[in-house]
Image (cartoon, rainbow, N blue to C red):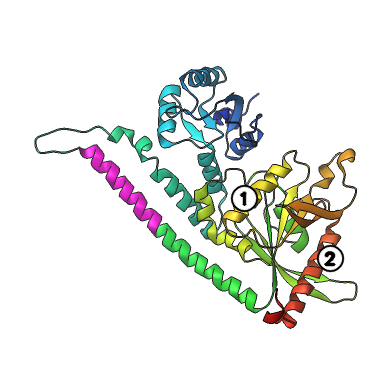
Amino acid sequence: MISNDAAQTPKALLVGVDFGLPHFDEDLAELGQLALTAGLSPVAHMTCKRKAPDAALFVGSGKAQEIKEMAVLHGATEVLFDQALSPAQQRNLERTLEMPVNDRTMLILQIFAQRARSHEGKLQVELARLQYLSTRLVRRWSHLERQSGGIGMRGGPGETQIELDRRMIGDSIKRTKDRLSKVKRQRDTQRRQRQRNQVFNVSLVGYTNAGKSTLFNSLVKARAYAADQLFATLDTTTRQLYLNNDQGTGSQISLSDTVGFIRDLPHGLVDAFEATLQEATSADLLLHVVDASHPSYPEQIAQVQSVLADIGASDVPQMLIFNKVDALEDAQQPHLLQDVYVLDDLPVPRLFLSAHTGFNLDSLRQRLLQHAQAHTQSLLNPVPEHDIV
């Protein structure tokens, strides 16, 4: 028997268009995960190939009719596209399909809105949502486009209402940006305090669901939320970690867990989460966590590198952490637990471990201790300017 909750869950048809790009997800597996995370139930998926998007319907009229027929066949209540749609394409598709249509961007925004917990996170998501909606007024308020004529009148009340809503959203964006600026100044103050204390700062970055929060909890014995789902963590959490060596001496480092990245992360979210992502740009070392068991991990690494470049963190030293080795088949197990991985034509140290089981975590602690002690030594004995090449 189907439960009432299952019966009431909105059903979604997933649609992907292959434009010949290397990262096309033929099975739409990631879009399906996003849909489940947002509280939707994927009932079927459809893919097609095009050289370029159709200006009006993104997929063309013939394919749009096929999508409508499949949606009706499977009882879908809305259609999700794996790519970003323009406001006009979204409006035209809804008229043709006669049901709600959303794109990947809106789906990610919806998940972020559900997951944000801190005041800062909620502000960041609200800013991104407002910026997204500001381009969609023509669709959301299509019933206001009708003009009532009259002597001496230009336009009509509908046109006035659209302008009013644009101004209201513009005012909300400005207020939210001002409030976020205050939060950013507070974070900058906290960051400068850590720098004055000469603490070695490490930030965890990586593709969503790579296991960053699980690794964070394992290292600092924290209770940050961690789950096998996309975007389990949105709010940056920072804890102090004390590392000991065999001689009984050690170092204290500052470890931060940041929001996960994803393919085609909306630029509005990257901009909105600038305050949070600033932890990565000001870090002394980035632990780039990778799901070693994911078949597309090279593409996920490339996506993370792209976002790091966007936020100005591409020059921060990295260590690749290939996580979830416990999920690898015997034939896939690494021959060496520590080696070098070529990243953007540069050799980067790589470490294999399992944050879930604790396998090889001691090696990571040892490497972090070495980095922290080298950092402290450089502060005590700075290199003279004339010796720097």
Secondary structure found at label 2:
helix
> In the depicted view, which residue is nearer to us: 293 or 355?
293
- 60 sits left or right of 217 in the view: left
> In the depicted view, which residue is nearer to us: 39 or 64?
64
Q: CA distance from mark 2 to mark 1?
A: 29 Å
Residue linked to disc 2: 366
Query: Which residue is at 87% across, 76% downward?
Result: 248
From this view, report whether residue 187 is shown above or below residue 227.
Answer: below
Which quadrant is home to the N terminus?
A: top right
In terms of secondary structure, what is the magenta stretch mainly?
helix
> Could you tell me if residue 209 is visible in this image?
no
Residue linked to disc 1: 306
Q: Which mark is residue 232?
A: none
Q: Which residues are magenta?
A: 156-174
- Amino acid carrying label 1: it is Ser
Question: Residue 72's x, y, as percent?
Answer: 52, 19
Which quadrant is home to the C terminus?
A: bottom right
- Amino acid carrying label 2: it is Gln
- 387 sits left or right of 21 in the view: right
- Badge 1: residue crowd in 10 Å (few <14, some 14–19, many ≥20): some
From this view, report whether residue 115 is shown above or below residue 182.
Answer: above
